[in-house]
Amino acid sequence: MPDLSPVQSPQGESGAAELEHGMALCLSGGGYRAMMFHLGALWRLHETGVLRRLRRISSVSGGSITAGVLALRWPAVMADAVPQTATFLREVVTPIRALAGETIDAEAIVFGLALPGRVSDRVAAAYDTHLFHGATLQDLPDEPRFVINATNVQSGALWRFMKPYMRDYRVGEVKRPTVPLAHAVAASSAFPPVLSPFELRLDPAAFTPGSGTDLQMAPYTTRVILTDGGVYDNLGLETAWKRYDTILVSDAGGQMQAEPEPKSDWARHAYRVLNVVDNQVRALRKRLLIASFKAPAGDADHRAGAYWGIRTDIAKYGLADALACPHDRTMMLANMPTRLKRLDDGAQDRLINWGYAVCDAALRRHVDPTLGPAPQLPYPGAAV
């Protein structure tokens, strides 16, 4: 069978020679739309006990906002021997919903253009004020491993923020980084062109000697220029795929819209062409992921697990007792813009409900058929 792997281990990249037995979760990008959709999925994963079984949570962009909050609140959420919805609501849902009630991208752009400093610095400050309160990567749990992914514009490689280290295989590795969690999330969600880039200033002496393949030198080790992790991998798949045999993917990514009269000036036409390239890369990664789920067990490309997406038709899971989510309604949610712009309570409810419902269907169809159906949506009065 041909190699279906959507990622390859670059020369010099560390990684397990064989897959480990374990489950990893990948959270895609998509601004506040993704943040809330993934929150619903995490809610269902928590209820079923699957959340506790995860070995790794890998995220990009809007997914990294949700992952960052979950990581910081992980000890409190896992303190209950039996999953408690009240705890999850207090520790994870409430702070994320509070952020979703604030518009932070427009203000950051206005002040970023008018005052010294980058737009991304102001986004990071907003994250810290609303969610992280001075926490650093060292405040993340040891288990599971949370990986917040950004894209290094200088090297063209993935830049990974984790508690044990942060690294780019070409530039090298910094062990036990004390980077603020808000900075890691801001770099991961610095979607171009308006919120990008995020500049990370580092001490070259902090890098482990000889840990980079060919770029462990200034300015790569002093001024790291980062953009949205979704530029490299919008599913957040790379760091999970290489290590674990079971992969769960929650995808709230956008979709390029048709344009009957593309602009012909060089700037807007170039931007449109780049969007076409990006759209095709995303589609390829998703197709390869689904093909790997269908590959025979024992094949090198086989992975167990499940994919659920914000554009999925829940009827295709073939469950008679799936929660009611009409496809025309869920597609309205899928077409919400990729912004860090205030969502009203109703929109938040519907996005959470949809993430919860489609995750439930995917888990019961492809991961654990013995799970009982969810009795109702988190916010039944809002539906989807």
Image: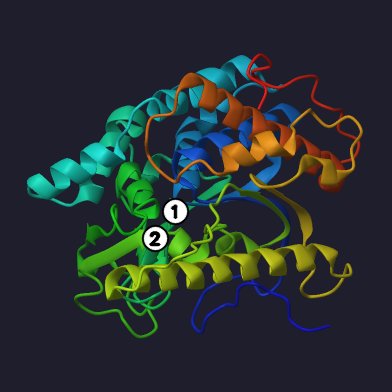
Q: Horizontal placement of 52 versus 336: left or right?
A: right
User: Label 1 sits on what residue type?
Assistant: Met
Looking at this view, is 300 or 340 the one in front? 340
Alpha-carbon span between mark 1 and mark 2: 6 Å
Residue nearest the observer in this picture, 332 or 214: 332
The residue tagged with tag 1: helix, strand or loop?
A: loop
Up the image or down, 200 lies above or below 186; here it is below
What residue is disc 2 on? 166
Q: Residue at x 37, y 55 (%)?
A: 191
Q: For the C terminus, which image quadrant? A: top right
Q: Is residue 205 above or below residue 21?
A: below
Q: Tell me, yes or no, if residue 232 can be seen here.
A: yes
The colour scheme used here is rainbow
Residue 328 in percent (x, y) is at 69, 38
The amino acid at mark 2 is Met
Q: Nearer the viewer, residue 176 or 280?
A: 280
Relative to 191, 311 lies left or right? right
At x 70% / y 41%, what residue is drawn? 53
Query: Relative to the observer, which residue lies in front, 29 or 51?
Result: 29
The local secondary structure at tag 2 comes to strand
CB contact under 8 Å: marks 1 and 2: yes
- The residue at the point 53 percent across, 73 percent down is 14
In the image, is residue 38 above or below residue 16?
above
The label shown at residue 162 is: 1
* Residue 173 picture location, percent across and down: 37, 68
Quarter of the image that includes the N terminus:
bottom right
CA neighbours of label 1 inside 10 A, class few (<14), some (14 to 19), many (20+): many
